[in-house]
């Protein structure tokens, strides 16, 4: 990998865009990054790391700190890096998250983290990734190194490469695990431990299954007396054989009891058929008596139904006269209403001042005259209605003239005040700029305080959760103990109840299956609540479930304890109140800084807008002067319109209060005339229609069976009433016929039956006795069948589990051996991951010694040791320094500062070589080393410089960050970072002459 060009803008100490051309140092092969402390030398390496990985060596997790403190909100922050891997040239452009002004409206918005990756193809940059996640994935494929590996092999960051030399075995293992991706071996260890535990659990489970199955089966055999003569041995094969023989004896007993059950069921079925026949006779007799009673009640309603039948006949005859009757009634009502309307219209006409006894012709002439006059008065009324608006517009025009003149004077006063305001803004800005500069530091402190506060709150919550988890664990353990005790008690009850079960099957005269006697003077009583196989199985399941819940509760409590410890550590030892106070204080400081920043931005914006304000006021003055002229012209026009309208309204009003009042009077008289004329015509027409309808009605009634119109109206019924009468008559006739037929059928069914009928209670008692005998036979057979089935299931479980024990035990021993080896349960406490990393460390030491031998003039070399560590710690990743002067090895911590730097540099270079070899052997054409040379004496510095010269072989370019004067003299190609007079830094590049 070779770096070509780096551009930094708004990044770290750099405000303006800085361009660094690494290709310019190809001829020298080594260049110095120089500058005063704090100028920003290491920020160049920060830019490289941020461009490739979105982070920097010095600010892990603090990408927001990378934006330059010198940036204004509208300034841009961006890093661009060009580099080559293999024969492909790439360019990555990345911006950190920061706040910028909104494009629309006021205020700030967050500019998200951006990243773009491009490839140079045929002289053109072609986009390959446009989002941070996509860019990260693509760069990971291109570089072949993760961030930690890159910092170890290319960016040897300040004070970092010495950590690997001086680290403890555990810390060194953590770094090597990150660089070589050996976490998978930890997963192997965990998975193998789980498999070992699973194998042990499986073996114990099989043994438990055999014991439980045989214990349960032997209890069942004893309870049903199926054991035969002689006691079986304690060996599993003997117990299994005895169980199989007991099953055979049980099957024979099932056959005998099944035959008895079949005979009892046949007797029960015969009794049931006889009882059903007696029940049917009694039911028919009850139905016959009920039918006789219902027929008598139905016949008693004949007179009522005949009256409804006649009413239905008359209603159907009158339905043909309904239309002429209703038409005549409606016509007479309309004539009466029309005459009343004519009388009311004449009264309204008289009230309006009209001529009495006016006929339709006179009213028509009057209506035409009033219509013409109303049209003329409407025009004048419109102008009368407009008069208030004209007066208001005239007054408003006068006010606009005065207001425009007043505004001109006010604008001129505002324009004169602008210079003084500009001076006030400059003074206020100086106060707020200094406070606003502390915002980023305050924001970082707030984030840290927030994390501690949240962790303290979480720790309190975790403590409560831990307390509840401990209580739950104790409760679950008690439940598991109780469930186990309940299962044992149930099993003991089952054994105690066996004698009662056997005694319930004894019969007088038949030999006892236990003692053989045909007499049974004292049979054991049957238990009131016998324990069955299902109940035993449920108790076992409940016990297993309770034990599982207790185990899970224990794991939950352990997890809660770990979570509480983690939260307490992250809280920094603060209680919630103390952490909250610290957070509030940090927020107050941040609020003050952000308030100052907002006030600074507001003042800058106001100051920048003063010139625009001055131009705007001048334009407003010109517009106001033009408005005065326009308002004066409008005032003259409105005055002329107002005078003309007032003259027209006065002529049309006459003696009335207003033109509108005169229109209302004329309209009222015209409306009364129109209404009276229409009422006269309507009354005449309605009277003639009523006379014609009455004549037609009388002719139709005379031709019908009714005496007169009143009789016909009395016979009328609506549709619903006619339907009700028809349904009532039909229902009566139908019910009467059905009852007669039903009574005949019941008499036929009872013909030939005994009188009185057979006794129903005696028949039911006989059936109950038969059912009880059948149930007893079925119970006896079922008990033995269930016992045999239970024995068969237990036998199958026991045989299957016994066949698996040998194979499971061999598997357990094999898995346990492998798990112990991988987990490092040996005398050196070295697990598989440490063994693999130790091999990598040997390669690193070998590569480092090539450099260290030259830099130390042959005195020192590094040595890997796998000696047993003290205090039972893990071994295998130790480092020692062998001193050729003494021939003895000693700890790396015993080296001096300069010696430590040389050894660390050699180890870092060796580590870089091995990591790149493991990453596919990518070529590293650019290397950076940040500080550390100040601790070297002149001779050692010369050795270090000679090593750096050797690194240039093969076209490699080495960048060294240092402020040591001797190095400035020896390295002519330099990047000089200088702080400008206004604060931001700038980069000055020289590839030819020493600075």
Image: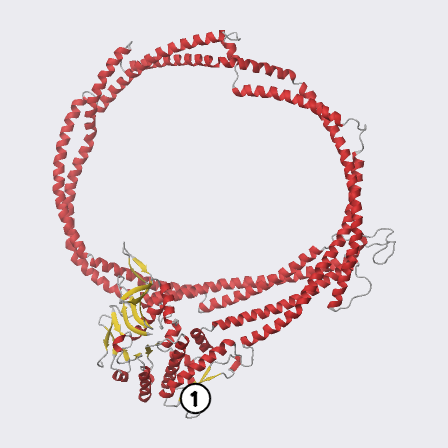
Vertical side of 466 occupied by 635: above or below? above
**Residue at the spot of label 1:** 882
Q: Considering depth in this image, is 871 or 927 the residue closer to the camera?
A: 927
Q: Which percent across, then down, holds residue 524? A: 81, 55
Q: Residue at x 77, y 68 (%)?
A: 233
Is 796 situated above or below 960? above
Indicate the position of residue 29 as horizontal and vertical percent values: 28, 80
Q: Position of residue 965 (x, y in %)?
A: 27, 83
Q: Judge whether residue 160 can be spotted in this image.
A: yes
Q: Quadrant of residue 451?
A: bottom left
Q: Quadrant of residue 795?
A: bottom right
Q: Is residue 745 left or right of residue 170?
A: right
What colour scheme does the image use?
secondary structure
Could you tell me which secondary element the residue under label 1 belongs to? strand
Q: Position of residue 454 (x, y in %)?
A: 43, 63
The reply, left or right, for residue 181 in relation to residue 262 is left
Seen from the viewer's position, the closer of residues 723 and 672 is: 723
Q: Residue at x 18, y 59 (%)?
A: 422
Q: Is residue 500 visible to us here?
A: no
């Amino acid at each position: 990998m070779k770096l070509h060009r780096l551009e930094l803008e708004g990044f770290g100490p750099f405000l303006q865009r800085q361009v660094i051309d690494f290709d310019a140092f190809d001829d020298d092969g080594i260049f110095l990054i120089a500058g005063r402390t704090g100028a920003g030398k290491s920020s160049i390496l920060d830019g490289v790391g941020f461009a490739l990985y979105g982070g920097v060596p010095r600010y892990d997790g603090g990408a927001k700190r990378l934006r330059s403190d010198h940036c204004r909100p509208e300034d841009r922050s961006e890093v661009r890096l060009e580099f080559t891997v293999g024969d492909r040239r790439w360019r990555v452009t990345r911006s950190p998250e920061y706040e910028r002004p909104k494009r629309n409206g006021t205020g700030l918005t967050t500019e998200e983290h951006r990243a773009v990756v491009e490839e140079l193809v045929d002289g053109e940059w072609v986009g390959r990734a446009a989002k941070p996640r996509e860019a990260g994935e693509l760069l990971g494929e291109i570089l072949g190194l993760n961030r930690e590996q890159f910092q170890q092999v290319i960016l040897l960051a300040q004070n970092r490469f010495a950590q690997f030399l001086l680290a403890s075995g555990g810390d060194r293992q953590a770094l090597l695990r990150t660089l070589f991706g050996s976490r998978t071996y930890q997963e192997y260890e965990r998975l193998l431990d789980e498999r070992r535990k699973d194998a042990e659990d499986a073996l114990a489970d099989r043994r438990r299954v055999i014991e439980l199955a045989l214990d349960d089966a032997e209890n069942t055999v004893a309870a049903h007396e199926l054991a035969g003569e002689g006691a079986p041995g304690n060996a599993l094969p003997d117990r299994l054989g005895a169980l199989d023989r007991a099953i055979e004896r049980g099957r024979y007993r099932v056959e005998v009891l099944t035959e008895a059950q079949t005979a009892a069921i046949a007797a029960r079925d015969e009794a049931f058929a006889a009882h059903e026949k007696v029940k049917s006779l009694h039911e028919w007799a009850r139905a016959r008596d009920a039918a006789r009673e219902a027929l008598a009640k139905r016949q008693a309603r004949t007179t009522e139904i005949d009256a409804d039948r006649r009413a239905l006949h008359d209603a159907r005859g009158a339905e043909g006269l309904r239309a002429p009757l209703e038409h005549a009634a409606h016509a007479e009502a309309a004539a009466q209403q029309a005459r009343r309307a004519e009388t009311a219209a004449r009264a309204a006409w008289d009230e309006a001042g009209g001529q009495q006894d006016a006929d339709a012709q006179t009213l028509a002439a009057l209506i035409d005259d009033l219509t013409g006059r109303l049209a003329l008065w409407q025009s004048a009324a419109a102008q009368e209605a407009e008069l208030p608006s004209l007066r208001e517009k005239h007054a408003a025009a006068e006010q606009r003239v005065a207001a425009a003149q007043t505004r001109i004077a006010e604008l001129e006063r505002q324009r004169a005040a602008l210079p003084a305001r500009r001076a006030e803004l400059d003074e206020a800005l100086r106060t707020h700029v200094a406070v606003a500069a502390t915002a980023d530091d305050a924001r970082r402190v707030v984030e840290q305080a927030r994390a501690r506060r949240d962790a303290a709150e979480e720790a309190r919550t975790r403590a409560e959760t831990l307390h509840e988890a401990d209580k739950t664990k104790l409760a679950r353990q008690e439940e598991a103990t109780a469930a186990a005790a309940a299962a044992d008690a149930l099993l003991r009850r089952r054994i105690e109840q066996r004698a009662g079960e056997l005694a319930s099957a004894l019969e007088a005269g038949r030999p006892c299956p236990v003692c053989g006697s045909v007499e049974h003077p004292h049979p054991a009583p049957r238990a009131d609540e016998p324990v069955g196989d299902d109940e035993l199985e449920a108790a076992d399941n409940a016990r297993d479930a309770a034990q599982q819940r207790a185990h899970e509760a224990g794991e939950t409590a352990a997890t809660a304890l770990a979570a509480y410890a983690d939260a307490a550590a992250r809280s920094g030892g603060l209680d919630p109140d103390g952490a909250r106070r610290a957070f509030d204080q940090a927020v107050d400081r941040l609020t003050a800084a952000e308030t100052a920043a907002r006030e600074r931005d507001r003042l800058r914006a106001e100051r920048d807008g003063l010139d625009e304000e001055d131009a705007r006021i001048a334009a407003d003055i010109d517009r106001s002067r033009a408005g005065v002229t326009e308002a004066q012209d409008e005032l003259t026009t409105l005055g002329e319109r107002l005078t003309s309208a007032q003259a027209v309204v006065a002529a049309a009003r006459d003696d009335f209060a207003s033109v509108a009042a005169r229109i209302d009077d004329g309209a009222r008289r015209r409306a009364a005339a129109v209404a009276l004329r229409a009422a006269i015509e309507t009354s005449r027409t309605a009277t003639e229609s009523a006379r014609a309808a009455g004549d037609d009605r009388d002719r139709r009634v005379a031709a019908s069976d009714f005496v007169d119109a009143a009789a016909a109206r009395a016979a009328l019924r609506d549709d619903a009433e006619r339907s009700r009468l028809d349904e009532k008559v039909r229902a009566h006739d139908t019910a009467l016929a059905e009852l007669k037929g039903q009574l005949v059928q019941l008499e036929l069914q009872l013909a030939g039956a005994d009188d009185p009928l057979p006794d129903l209670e005696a028949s039911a008692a006989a059936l109950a006795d038969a059912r009880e005998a059948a149930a007893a036979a079925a119970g006896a057979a079922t008990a033995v069948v269930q016992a045999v089935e239970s024995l068969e299931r237990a036998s199958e479980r026991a045989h299957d589990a016994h066949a698996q024990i040998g194979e499971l035990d061999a598997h357990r021993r094999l898995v346990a051996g492998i798990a112990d080896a991988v987990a490092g349960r040996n005398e050196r406490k070295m697990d598989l991951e440490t063994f693999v990393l130790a091999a990598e460390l040997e390669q690193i030491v070998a590569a480092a010694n090539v450099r260290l031998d030259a830099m130390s003039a042959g005195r020192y070399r590094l040595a890997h040791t796998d000696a047993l560590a003290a205090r039972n710690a893990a071994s295998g990743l130790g480092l020692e320094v062998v001193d050729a002067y003494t021939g003895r090895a000693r700890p790396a911590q015993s080296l001096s500062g300069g010696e430590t730097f040389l050894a660390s540099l050699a180890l870092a270079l060796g580590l870089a070589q091995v990591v790149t070899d493991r990453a596919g052997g990518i070529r590293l054409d650019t290397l950076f080393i940040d500080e550390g040379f100040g601790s070297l004496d002149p001779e050692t510095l010369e050795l270090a410089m000679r090593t750096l010269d050797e690194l240039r072989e093969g076209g490699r370019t080495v960048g060294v960050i240092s402020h040591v004067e001797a190095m400035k003299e020896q390295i002519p190609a330099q990047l000089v970072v200088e702080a400008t007079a206004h604060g931001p830094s700038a980069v000055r590049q020289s590839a030819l002459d020493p600075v």
